[in-house]
Image (spheres, rainbow, N blue to C red):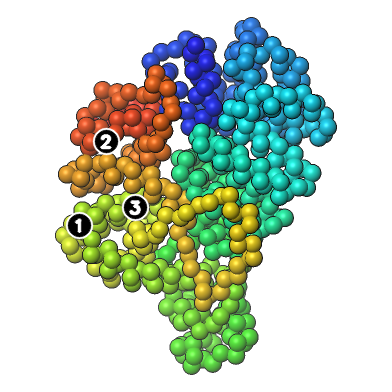
Amino acid sequence: MLLKLVTKLSTYGQFGRPFMNYLESISLNNETIEYIEILKLFWDNKYDEVLETIERNISKLRKGSLYYLLLSIKLSALHRLKREQEVKEIYDELRDNFGNIPRYVRGTVVESLRNIRELYYDSNESMEKIRYWSEAYENDPVNKGFILMADARGKKNEGNYVEATQLNIQAFKILKDVPHPSGVVQALNNISWWLKDVDKSIALNFSFPLGFYLGYYFDDDNFNVFNSLDTTFQVQKNNNDPMMYETAFIFSKCLSKVDKERYNILKRKCGKSINQLKYCVFNLDSNYYLNTKVLRNFIKQEIEKEQVSIKELNISKRTLNDFLSGITKQIKSNTLRNIIDNLEFEINSSLAIPIIKELKKKDIDKKFEENFYKFMELEVEKQLTKFFTSYLVHYYKQEVKLERVIKDIEGGSLIKGRCDYYTRELINSIFEKTPNIDVGSLLTTNQEQKTYTNKDITFKEHPFYSARKILVKRFIKDLNKAYLQEFIEKYIKVDSKRKDMIERYIMNYGRYDEIKNIPKELRPKVPKEINVFVKKYTLKRRPSATSFYVFEEKEREEVVEMLKMFE
């Protein structure tokens, strides 16, 4: 019975983690706990540990439910490690013994078999038996979703990209209803990655929902985040899309949180993007730029091309000549702004970063002129709520002096001129509309490639942030507003590690707020250690408990201590 429950939970993929952690906490038999731990190792991409643990346990098992579940995980782990011969051996064992596998386990096995068949075998090989399995188990939505993705891979291998995309869209819709976050993101990632060299504008269309669901479903350290940011960055770069710079920024911030071992793994997987990040990531607060050969050659070329007079550039002849000849080693940001404001050129991924940076700052300034006054018209409580929400969502928070901004808001003394570019961007974010994403229409929408110039460029909010705002708003909406200022003040005082924990807790509260179809016996209860926190801030009990059990056992002890600081 317990193994059946865990098998059911595994159909949510990584989204089932808190429910499995809860079951572990209320004691299960050793075999079931071992299976849960292997699943979590697999979700964390620790494939060598997965294989080592399976080998240690599988020889003790009779050929029943757990044996075949472990064999299925082993198959997927071997594939991730590219151990092709062993993959085929396990595939053959599972295929040839399929009739002996207990029925409630077969759906899980079918997913693995179908995907491996498309990757390793010719299209006509073992097809009859695989098709029979598909028909027998595709009524289960998770099985059906992954079978559709396996079929899509087959169509892609045949060069039929339109049909492959349509199958992935079907899989996305089915898995989103479960929900199965890894499957949702995988379907979108498949489309963008497969089409990036075939139809790059359609690939770009699908990179937008990919970024959205990435932010919606996953914490920063999840492998899906890096894999999909890699895809998104490359697709946006191919299209000269200005959003590539924000994707690069997000990518670099996530990378900064991983240890050396994880970084080396990611470097092997996403090395091309990681090597290119340094050419695309920039800060917003410097007032001078180095006078590089790339920068001055570009400006010289554009001035000569457009035959612009020095008078039109609003700078002195000497300043311009010293810059173009390389005599001056730096150029002021406002001087560069004056120059590029009087030119017109296309945006592409090879432009010098100082140019992109000034265009970004100009875009921020333009939006901030309107948004600051809209912000100041709000009541103080709403200013606090909305700014804190924006702060928690964006990686710009690392550059913002939150305590000072909150103090200014509370005292009614926030002044436009004192807001740096990071603070301005957070205020602008408050007034960004939540995007309406219709994945089904993206295959035929906006197929003409967009060309941006410095005159019409706008830097839209990254969907990664838009999604996370939805999550944080759910938490803030439920938070007792009588304690809002106290909550923010206590957040400000805790160290960076505890800040990260409370942010993860808040995000996961939002992620699990709408999950309704978990059986009652699998729903976590609020542990007494955090009951005072939940009651004080009038939070919903189910998402409060579920968010708590997203953390592993040792982490939960730290979360308890952290939440006590907010009581």
Q: What amino acid is labelled 3 in the image?
A: Tyr
Can residue 66 be seen in this snapshot?
yes
Q: Earlier in the sequence, mark 1 or mark 2?
A: 1
Viewer-closest of 61 and 340: 61
Give the residue pinned by disc 3: 391
Give x and y (percent) for residue 396.
39, 55
3 or 1: mark nearer the eye: 1
Give the residue pinned by disc 2: 539
Q: Secondary structure at mark 2?
A: loop
Viewer-closest of 2 and 411: 2
Give x and y (percent) for residue 173.
56, 41
In this picture, residue 135 sits left or right of residue 556: right
Q: Relative to 437, is 299 above or below?
A: below
| Mark 1 Cα shell of 10 Å, populated few (<14), some (14-19), many (≥20) | some
Give x and y (percent) for residue 112.
66, 27
Q: Secondary structure at mark 1?
A: helix
Give x and y (percent) for residue 60.
62, 7
Q: Quadrant of residue 19?
A: top left
| Mark 2 Cα shell of 10 Å, populated few (<14), some (14-19), many (≥20) | some
